[in-house]
Image (cartoon, rainbow, N blue to C red):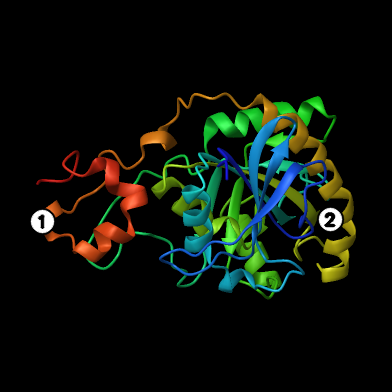
Amino acid sequence: MDGAKVGIIGGSGLYHVEGMMGVEEVKLSTPFGGPSDTIVMGTLEGVRVAFLPRHGEGHRISPSELPAKANIYALKSLGVERIISVSAVGSLKEGIEPLDIVIPDQVVDATKGRANTFFTDGIVAHVSLAEPFCPVLSQLAFEASTKVGAKVRKGATYLVMEGPQFSTKAESQLYRSWGADLIGMTVLPEAKLAREAEICYATLAIVTDYDCWHTSHESVSTDMILTNLLVGVETVKRILKSLIPSIPERRDCVCANALENAIATSAEYIPQEKKKELDLLIGKYLGRGGYVE
């Protein structure tokens, strides 16, 4: 089985990618359990890709229950170096309208207790998240969106709430006062884990609603989201077909070597089982950087 350097994590409404050729399904297990679903490997616009439906086929996994560590680790094990995630979001700003496509560049974590690091139980690492989304991949996503005629905005702060319930009006107004532009439930811990795995990560956010702050629009509902998603997902599919073949082979971004000087624990103190568990991520750094053999 050939690997893939590009991964797609499909959000609400995106469970398949039409046009993939030579499709094969791959079932994987990881040290962190199984991923959300079978990973679909194939060729899209001449590029090998790996597609994973975030919530599983049929949307059966809640945002709070997503096996994010298994998802990122599984894609890494297939050779993925870049992840394009698709996420349904609400707008917290008047100027960001339903059906817009937004490529965020910042994130605020308002989740509660999600497992958001690979580095636990005897090993500590501190990666930089100053730019939580890969700036290079995000720019390529913006250019592809523009090329296919999407109404797209580049640059926004995405607030990640716990869910699965939608916001109260008080919460929605609070998040607006913080300067957040978008609200959703899924970009974290994916972005943090992707950075720890040295994978470039960018998001195509489909705006489905105005959350519940907007007095002239009805409060967000599942029906509203799903109706707008049907339109937004078709736009995203066009963007993906333009974006994926534009991705260069070489990576010149902070993501590619995020762990190089991030590991704080000396090698002699790292448990052997942890070294084995994380070999896919840290093996190349043994004896280098933060390690002292």
Q: Position of residue 190 (x, y in %)?
A: 52, 55
Near-viewer residue (249 or 186): 249
Tell which of 104 and 36 is nearer to you. 36
Residue at horizontal 36%, vertical 35%?
A: 257
Residue 62 circle label? none
Q: Is residue 139 left or right of residue 207?
A: left
Q: Is residue 88 above or below residue 1?
A: below
Query: Crowding at label 2, few (<14), some or many (≥20) Cα neighbours within 10 Å?
Result: many
Up the image or down, 155 lies above or below 223; here it is above
Q: Position of residue 156 (x, y in %)?
A: 62, 42
Q: CA distance from mark 1 to mark 2?
A: 50 Å
Task: Identify the residue at the far front of this view.
Answer: 1
Of badges 1 and 2, nearer the viewer stands 1
Q: Residue at x 35, y 49 (%)?
A: 281
Q: Please tell me whether mark 2 sits on a helix, a strand or a loop.
A: helix
Q: Earlier in the sequence, mark 1 or mark 2?
A: 2
Which quadrant of the rendered structure holds the N terminus?
Answer: top right
User: Pointer 2: what residue?
Assistant: 229
Tell me which corner region of the image, top left, top right, bottom left or bottom right, holds residue 100: top right
Question: What residue would you read off at disc 1?
Answer: 268
- The amino acid type found where label 1 is placed reads Glu
Residue drawn 30% across and 48% down?
A: 282
Task: Compare residues 23 and 107 and report the one nearer the observer.
Answer: 23
**Quadrant of the image occupied by residue 211:** bottom right
Q: Label 2 is placed on what type of residue? A: Leu
Q: Are marks 1 and 2 in contact (CB under 8 Å)?
A: no
At horizontal 83% and vertical 29% (from top left) the residue drawn is 148
For the residue labelled by badge 1, is the local secondary structure a helix, a strand or a loop? helix
Q: Is residue 105 left or right of residue 253?
A: right
The answer to which quarter of the image holds residue 286 is top left
Looking at the image, is 71 positioned above or below residue 138?
Answer: below
Q: Count how many numbered circles sit on residues in the image.
A: 2
